Image (cartoon, rainbow, N blue to C red):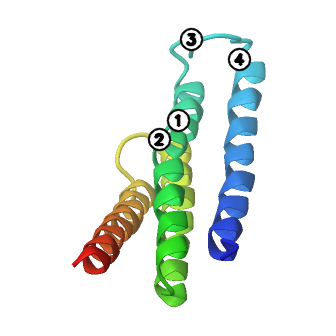
């Protein structure tokens, strides 16, 4: 198995991670802050969007890869990958563009949690079914 599904979503998420990285650099340069956030709202938002992405995307991609290696559920894995991609993009834009709660943040986290939950349960069920 060559992890084509995981490769697709890892590549797309990697490009978005670069975009978020550039948003942090841009905000740092605009505000002349090289370390920390200087208590500047737009820099704090950019840093948190970038960090939040880095906190969730890797685990979900690992679960996606394991699911792809242990089963043949391509449609299910694409749905989870698409949910993760949507969730990370929506959450980041919701966080960057609005202070406080926003539809992007809420829908993004719900989509990310749905992907994380579905992949976690899927992987557990595959392992349990193969060991029984």
| 129 or 85, nearer to the observer | 129
Q: Position of residue 45 (x, y in %)?
A: 53, 34
Q: Residue at x 50, y 34 (%)?
A: 48
Q: Nearer the viewer, mark 2 or mark 3?
A: 2
Q: Position of residue 13 (x, y in %)?
A: 65, 57
Residue linked to disc 4: 31
Task: Using the rendered view, name the quadrant where residue 31 is placed.
Answer: top right
Q: Residue at x 51, y 56 (%)?
A: 62
Q: Mark 4 or 3 closer to N-term?
A: 4
**Cα separation between marks 1 and 4:** 19 Å
Residue linked to disc 2: 55
The residue carrying pointer 2 sits among few (fewer than 14), some (14 to 19) or many (20 or more) residues within 10 Å by Cα, namely few
Quarter of the figure with the C terminus: bottom left
Q: Secondary structure at mark 4?
A: helix
The residue carrying pointer 4 sits among few (fewer than 14), some (14 to 19) or many (20 or more) residues within 10 Å by Cα, namely some
**Cα separation between marks 2 and 4:** 25 Å
Q: Nearer the viewer, mark 1 or mark 4?
A: 1
The residue carrying pointer 3 sits among few (fewer than 14), some (14 to 19) or many (20 or more) residues within 10 Å by Cα, namely few
Q: Are marks 2 and 4 in contact (CB under 8 Å)?
A: no
């Amino acid at each position: 198995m060559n992890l084509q599904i995981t490769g697709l979503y890892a590549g797309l998420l990697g490009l978005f991670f670069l975009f978020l990285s550039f948003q942090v650099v841009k905000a740092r340069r605009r505000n002349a802050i090289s370390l920390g956030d200087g208590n500047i709202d737009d820099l704090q938002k950019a840093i948190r969007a970038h960090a939040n992405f880095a906190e969730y995307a890797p685990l979900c991609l690992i679960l996606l890869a394991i699911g792809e290696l242990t089963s043949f559920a391509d449609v299910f894995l694409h749905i989870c990958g698409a949910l993760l991609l949507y969730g990370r993009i929506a959450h980041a834009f919701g966080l960057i563009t609005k202070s406080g709660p926003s539809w992007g943040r809420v829908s993004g986290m719900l989509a990310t949690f749905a992907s994380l939950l579905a992949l976690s349960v899927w992987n557990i069920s595959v392992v349990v079914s193969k060991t029984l």
